[in-house]
Amino acid sequence: MIFTILWSAIALVLFMHIPFLIGTALKNNGVIDSFYPLGFVVLIWTSFILMGTFGIHQIIVTILVTLWGARLAIHVTNRNWGKPEDKRYRNMRERFGDEVILKSYLRIYLFQSLIIFLVAFPALFINSNPSPELAFMNWSTFTLVLGGVIWVIGFYFEAVGDYQLAHFLKQPENKGKIMDQSVWKYTQHPNYFGEVTMWWGIWVISTGIYFPWGFITVFGPIIINFMIINVSGVRLLKKGFEGNDEYAKYQRRTPQFIPWKPKKN
């Protein structure tokens, strides 16, 4: 297990040098956003190949992570293609000054590698241990089914939320309006909720592996939960809409994160 985890981590770090070189050459560290989900795919496929057991748990989890990572990478690339460097990274570039290359390498690319490793650890744990035998209503079967259902719910919210928002923003008549239909009617952040939910689903599956040690990997979904709500996702979006009266009304009637019935205005 240690061998698989170690070499998977090395493969991830080596892979993250690709966006570092591209971002440095283009002077646009925003490319990391497209490579970030692919880092998960590289990490999980490396562990899948190195372990070589190809049990049902490993196969399913590897497919789930690949579907999530590939879809998100394509979505983010389409969204950012041809646009200048994101404001977040421009501000970092200004703060880093003459040490922009070294500090970007450490604080953006290597830091993202660490986050990927920690968040994906439940999946890495699954791929680094033998898959238990499946039997009717035993623990590993129950957690595989339950975790899979949770993941599908999360994937639906993230994929549908991203698609509908992208379509909404392309319509000229929607300029200045707030997206509040479909999944956006029940949560202010369906895409972020979906991403967090998927990683909780992966963790549930991990609890059926090498029982009870899989429970310890709960730090993975906790970290992505914290990062999305308090650091990179929800917090930044709310800050960007400060002073927008329409968004304030939307916030008052729509649950912030967990989908629920909206309030009446």
Image (spheres, rainbow, N blue to C red):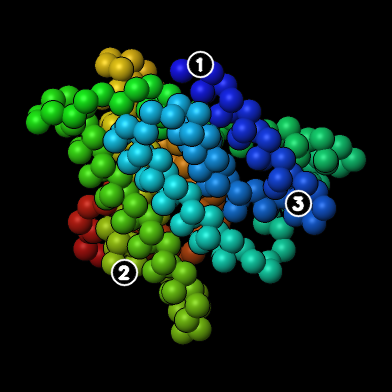
- The numbered mark at residue 181 is 2
Q: CA distance from mark 1 to mark 2?
A: 47 Å
For marks 2 and 3 on the same chain, the one whose residue lies earlier in the sequence: 3
Tag 1 or tag 3, which sits nearer the N-term?
1
- Could you tell me which residue is drawn at 50 percent across and 29 percent down? 50
Q: Amino acid at mark 1?
A: Ile
Q: Nearer the viewer, mark 3 or mark 1?
A: 1
The residue where tag 3 is placed is 22
The reply to whether dot 3 and dot 1 touch (C-beta < 8 Å) is no
Q: According to the image, label 1 marks what residue?
A: 2
Q: Is residue 213 visible?
A: yes
Residue positioned most to the left: 136
Residue 129, percent from left and from top: 38, 22
Q: CA distance from mark 2 to mark 3?
A: 37 Å
Across and down, in percent, residue 102 comes to 82, 35
* Front residue (pair 190, 239): 190
Question: Element at badge 2?
Answer: loop
